[in-house]
Image (cartoon, grey):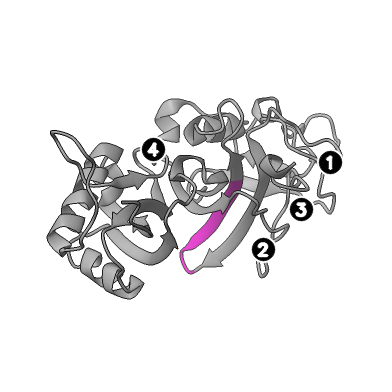
Amino acid sequence: MQGITARVRYAKTGLARFIGHLDTARTLLRAVRRAGVETLYTQGFTPRMRLSFGPPLPLGLTSDCEYMDIKLARGYDPETVKEKLQSQLPEGLAVTEVEVLGDAPEALQTAFWATEYEIDLGGTGFQPVNHGQDAHATPRRPAPESGEPEPSGLAKAPAERGHAENVPSCAVPGQASKESPVVDLSWREETTPGRAERVLSVIVRHDVPGGGRVKEVVRRLLGIEEPELERLRIHKKKVFWRGERPLTSLPGTQSNRRCTLMDADPASA
């Protein structure tokens, strides 16, 4: 029996970011069982509920877009499944959407090709410098002694911390790199009472070496070491499914793009 696949999107926030992937999976499995949702089980001596999960979220990251597939034994209204599951989840895990897909959707482990992350730079000393109009400008370290204008990009004040040499190569029009995990890089700056928010947004591919190691990508982008990396707040904002491409800009934000988007999803080429 093939069953019906329900794709559950859930958020992981607050202290739940310190729950590892396996413990999160066990928590969700127990929630499905307690919710009374009828699911299919594997065959054999030790039948297991037929659940599958997307790639593991690194420990310490929050997320708006984690996914779980459930093989249902019968049809359910998606809102009913959502309410039943949410009633059994602890604080920090929240079901945001349930979609019924049918018999045999693409496996979650390979269903999307890129992910967008946001890194909160507030309070770190990193800040954008010299808002240039050149969207393809490559940032370099400031050279105050040379008398030359500081190029667009990120600089560490007062000490030099963000090194362009450490930035993975980015895809540019007509020269889409098949090796770089970074598809797009931008920032936005918002000022609120008592706080200047600086957020770095990076879109990372999964189909190149190192693309799944977002912490390593961020470490290289900012030129920082492991202890300081662990103090950063990194948030998984969005996944891009096969055939879906990112937007070229975000309305209502002030951004300074360090690299540009590839023309299309590499998997569709």
Image mark for residue 58: 4
Residue 13 at least partly seen: no
Say whether disc 2 or disc 1 marks the residue closer to the N-terminus: 1
Kindly identify the amino acid type of the residue bearing the numbered disc 4: Pro
Q: Position of residue 17 (x, y in %)?
A: 31, 47
Task: Name the front one of labels 3 and 4.
Answer: 4
Kindly identify the amino acid type of the residue bearing the numbered disc 2: Leu
Kindly identify the amino acid type of the residue bearing the numbered disc 3: His
Say whether disc 2 or disc 3 marks the residue closer to the N-terminus: 3
User: Where is mark 2, residue-wise?
Assistant: 250
Residue 77 at least partly seen: yes
Alpha carbon distance from label 2 to label 1:
28 Å
Q: Residue furthest front?
A: 1
Decide if residue 186 is on the left or right side of residue 137: left
**Mark 3 burial class by Cα count in 10 Å: few <14, some 14-19, many 20+:** some
Task: Name the front one of labels 1 and 3.
Answer: 3
Q: Nearer the viewer, residue 64 or 196?
A: 64
Q: Position of residue 21 (x, y in %)?
A: 30, 39
User: Where is mark 3, residue-wise?
Assistant: 131
User: Where is mark 1, residue-wise?
Assistant: 149
| Secondary structure found at label 1 | loop
| Secondary structure found at label 4 | loop
Task: Name the front one of labels 2 and 1.
Answer: 2
**Mark 1 burial class by Cα count in 10 Å: few <14, some 14-19, many 20+:** few
Say whether disc 4 or disc 1 marks the residue closer to the N-terminus: 4
Q: Answer with the quarter of the image where residue 146 lies.
A: top right
